[in-house]
Image (cartoon, grey):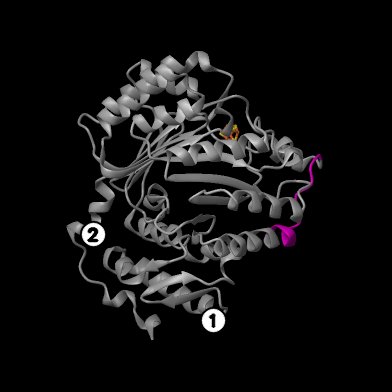
Amino acid sequence: MESSQSASSRSASSNSATEHLSTPKAAYVHVPFCHARCPYCNFTVVANRLDLVDRYVEAVTRELTSLVHPRTVNTIFIGGGTPTLLPRAPMVRLFEAIRTWVPLVDGGEWSIEANPQDVDRDLCLLLRDQGINRISLGGQSFDAAKLKMLGRDHTGDQLANSIDIATQYFDEVSVDLIFGVPGESMQVWKSDLQTATSRSVSHLSAYGLTYEKGAQYWSQLQKGQIVAVEEEIELEMYLYAIETLTQHGMNHYEVSNFAKPGSECLHNQTYWQGDAWLGIGPGAAAYVDGIRSVNHRSTLKYLQRMESGLSPVAESQTLDWSTQTRERFIFGMRQLKGVQWSSLVNSGEPKSVEAIAQQLPKHIELGFLEWHEGNIRLTPKGLPISDSLWLDYW
Ligand code: SF4
């Protein structure tokens, strides 16, 4: 029985077991600019402040220069915020700085998040010429009332057009959709999925709306000004997404992510597998040598610190071996393939691996987890309630 594989079979830690912590293979660059702040968003964002763009590009270039020597990475992800809101000249300067300091390996993945409203042929050509090979459209919905509720500044037609244009220039086109928006019916969600799958997107992220502290929606919910979609309906929406997207040939490879075979986002796998990554820009998090650090979330503070020759880091924490092991397990379990047990045993802190092993049988017995070819993974029954399981593994 595979559950008999235990921490006691763990071999001695080796240099190769920790190399994934010291050599970042991924770089995230945060661009904080947006037209306006959406009511559900609590990301590091500045609305309507394009006057700061030149200072921002200069500051990010300084932060990259502080790497001292170029770090070759497998993946780059430019996220936000709305990176495609940058005017073309500073956008190109940003890309040049990124290419200089975090050059991509041959065949590496370079993603950028884009607002559907900004996507046209000129932009796609520019991005492709700069080396970007994957575009992620922050669409959220094709439905007018839902988009209005989400405070989005694009229309459903603009999202559909942006997909059609992007697929002419990029093999890898991803779309984000949100479900469980106040007032949303099952019919609206079905229609969103139908429209998305009728177009040739290679990757789709389907997120249930969350009410984050600090976001406008959070306080509106507390005051009863908006009503959250009932849990059972949200669950039905999630299960419907899984059924529809897998029927359309998409591989459900992470709790919220679906991809045509071979189009899985490599960058995000760095996070889920507990490998090291660089984080550049305001509010960006990094994880190198077992140290998790987060830059100042205030864009102005980040700029001022970089301009004064100070570190952009607001907080940093050294994760001990036990925490690294537990995080690697919990984040890894977000992937539908689960966690390779022998790899966790070989690189994890023995007592933590043993503690994880002791928790598994009850969740296996309840039908939430299962063994499959040496991996421990979520079952379809465990998937919708997965977040509630992980408390037992801390
Ligand atoms: S949800 Fe996206 S577009 Fe809206 S404010 Fe947040 S980062 Fe900007």
141 and 209: which is toward the camera? 141
Specify the quadrant of the image occupied by residue 175. top right
Q: Which residues are magenta?
A: 225-234
| Left or right: 6 in relation to 190 | left
Q: Nearer the viewer, residue 31 or 23?
A: 31
User: Considering only vertical position in the picture, is 84 above or below 385?
Assistant: above
Q: Is residue 301 visible?
A: yes
Magenta-drawn stretch, dominant element (helix, strand or loop): loop
Q: Is residue 394 above or below residue 309?
A: below
Quick check: is the Cβ at mark 2 less than 8 Å away from ligand 1?
no
Q: Position of residue 307 (x, y in %)?
A: 37, 16
Residue 255 % position (x, y): 53, 59
Q: Position of residue 341 (x, y in %)?
A: 35, 71
Q: Secondary structure at mark 1?
A: helix
Q: Quadrant of residue 18?
A: bottom left
Can I make out residue 24 in this image?
no
| Vertical position of residue 140 compared to residue 95: above or below | below
Spatial separation of the CA atoms under disc 1 and disc 2: 31 Å
- Residue at image position (43%, 37%) is 169
Which quarter of the image is occupied by the N terminus?
A: bottom left
Mark 2 surroundings: few (<14), some (14-19) or many (≥20) residues within 10 A: some
- View extreme (top): residue: 51
Which residue appears at 63% of the width and 40% of the height?
213
Q: Position of residue 145 (x, y in %)?
A: 76, 39
Q: Secondary structure at mark 2?
A: helix
Residue ID at (61%, 38%): 159
Q: Identify the mark nearer the N-term, 1 or 2.
A: 2
Q: Residues within 10 Å of mark 1 (few under 14, many from 20)?
A: few
Rendered image: mark on residue 365: 1
Type of amino acid at the residue the image marks with label 2: Ala
Is 265 one of the magenta-colored residues? Answer: no
